[in-house]
Image (spheres, rainbow, N blue to C red):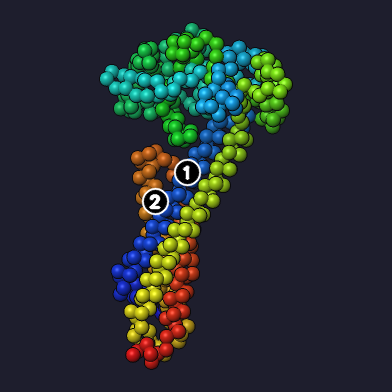
């Protein structure tokens, strides 16, 4: 075993150009697989972290039905009075929080400008999302009641407008409204559908509705959290009937709202992950098959180049099995090296994606073990034919 390994290593060093191309073909395939696995696992972990912050006891009511969603536009159907009615009717709801949303809002400080998502909410926003204020103070019930021009900022906004300096106490322009920064939300590394959650501003809902949206009635979503999440399905059914009755929806008509729970998000993630795994499997299989054919052809050429060496080894007592094992060891060694190089390349590519596009990545030893195993299996499978070809040469004919 050790002599075969030593012979394989010597052959790799002796035929450097051939070894380089073999390692390159395998490493490209493994790098692609590693990058995809890291991206899938990173997105999966981030999504589940988001679901955890969303809350297993949460029902998120979104205005507009499926018809409006399909057309790319959601009709305004939820109101502040809906939120108040839910709060009064459902004793098990420990939080009912309406939210008004204005996307793509220009925020500025001095000469610096930035586009951010503005959310109008209540003093319960940070508590409802388990998102503490890391600096300054939170919104208060008095801020909401009086509609004051105050706000909380995400870290992305702080970076863009203040170069990471403390913004607390400073006044920024949110659209055409001067707004005093009273607090900064803690860093949230996860993203939501590709959107940086740190890139947002939270203001009193009364301020956003009246001064930014010119709206006095409709809200974008209502978040409801129940005390007993074990009975969430029952609460959702009751909530659905309650809103249909309030909105005067006939029995055969569709809902003019959509209720989302963490179970629905998880089901979507499972389906999405399954699709990505299938894509990963096909991509990896094709890449490894291509690299395997490259490996097999280069090794067949190597057998012809090393015919005399094979003949001498046979003449000195090496059996056909020894020659077969030597070539198979050589193929496995080269592809193992390709697996290691490919894994490192995959890490490098993923880190570049993470740095340039803020793409979540996650590496594990399982991914490394899988990459190494796949590469060695590729070497063994596609190295069999060249190994058989080399071991079948007759000693006398090979020496000639």
Residue occupying the far left of the picture: 111
In this rendering, position of residue 196 left or right of residue 93: left
Residue 35 seen in the current view: yes
Left or right relative to 385: residue 244: right
Say which residue appears at 55% left-offset and 29% top-offset.
Answer: 70
Question: Residues under labels 1 and 2: Cα distance?
Answer: 13 Å
Mark 1 and 2 residues: CB-CB less than 8 Å, in contact? no
Question: Which circle marks residue 252 in the picture?
Answer: none
Can you give x and y, in whole percent of width and height, for residue 186 in the image? 44, 28
* Left or right: 82 in relation to 330: right
Instruction: Give the residue at x 45% y 68%.
Output: 379
Instruction: State the residue in front, 230 or 269.
Output: 269
- Binning the other alpha carbons within 10 Å of mark 2 as few (below 14), some (14 to 19) or many (20 upward) gives many
* Residue 369 to residue 72: above or below: below
Q: Secondary structure at mark 1?
A: helix
Quadrant the N terminus occupies = bottom left
Q: Position of residue 94 (x, y in %)?
A: 63, 21
**Can you give x and y, in whole percent of width and height, for residue 115 in the image?**
37, 24
**Position of the C terminus by quadrant:** bottom left
Q: Earlier in the sequence, mark 1 or mark 2?
A: 1
Q: Which residue is mark 2?
A: 347
Q: Nearer the viewer, residue 129 or 192?
A: 192
Q: Is residue 143 visible?
A: no
**Can you name the residue that lies furthest to the top here?**
146
Depth check, front residue: 72 or 268:
72
347 and 398: which is toward the camera: 398
Determine whether 100 is above or below 395 in the image: above
**Residue 42 badge:** 1
Helix, strand or loop under label 2 = helix
Could you classify mark 1 by the number of other residues whose Cα lies within 10 Å: few (under 14), some (14-19), or many (20 or more)?
A: some
155 above or below 49?
A: above
């Amino acid at each position: 075993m050790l002599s075969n390994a030593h012979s394989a290593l010597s052959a790799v060093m002796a035929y450097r150009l051939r070894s380089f191309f073999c390692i390159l073909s395998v490493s490209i395939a493994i790098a692609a697989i590693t990058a995809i696995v890291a991206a899938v696992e990173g997105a999966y972990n981030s999504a589940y972290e988001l679901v955890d912050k969303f809350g297993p006891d949460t029902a998120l009511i979104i205005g507009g039905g499926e018809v409006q969603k399909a057309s790319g536009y959601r009709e305004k159907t939820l109101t502040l009075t809906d939120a108040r009615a839910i709060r009064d009717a459902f004793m098990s709801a420990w939080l009912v929080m309406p939210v008004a949303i204005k996307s793509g809002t220009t925020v500025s400080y001095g000469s610096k400008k930035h586009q951010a998502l503005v959310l109008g909410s209540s003093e319960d926003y940070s508590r409802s999302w388990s998102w503490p204020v890391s600096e300054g103070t939170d919104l208060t019930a008095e801020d909401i009641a009086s509609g004051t021009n105050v706000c909380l900022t995400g870290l992305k906004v702080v970076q863009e407008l203040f170069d990471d300096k403390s913004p607390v106490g400073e006044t920024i322009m949110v659209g055409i409204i001067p707004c005093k920064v009273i607090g900064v939300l803690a860093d949230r590394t996860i993203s939501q559908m590709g959107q940086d959650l740190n890139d947002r501003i939270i203001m009193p809902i009364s301020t956003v509705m009246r001064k930014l949206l010119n709206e006095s009635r409709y809200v974008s979503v209502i978040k409801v959290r129940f005390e007993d999440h074990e009975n969430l399905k029952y609460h959702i059914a009751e909530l659905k009937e309650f809103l249909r009755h309030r909105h005067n929806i006939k029995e055969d008509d569709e809902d003019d709202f959509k209720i989302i729970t963490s179970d629905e998000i998880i089901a979507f993630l499972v389906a999405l992950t399954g699709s990505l795994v299938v894509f990963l499997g096909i991509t990896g299989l094709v890449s490894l098959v291509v690299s395997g054919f490259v490996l097999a052809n280069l090794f067949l050429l190597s057998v012809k180049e090393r015919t005399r060496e094979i003949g001498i080894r046979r003449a000195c007592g090496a059996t056909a099995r020894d020659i077969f094992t030597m070539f198979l060891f050589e193929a496995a060694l080269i592809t193992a090296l390709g697996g290691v190089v490919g894994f490192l390349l995959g890490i490098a590519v993923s880190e570049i994606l993470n740095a340039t596009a803020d793409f979540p990545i996650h590496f594990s030893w399982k991914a490394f073990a899988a990459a190494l195993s796949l590469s060695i299996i590729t070497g063994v499978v596609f190295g069999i034919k060249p190994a058989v070809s080399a071991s079948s040469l007759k000693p006398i004919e090979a020496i000639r």
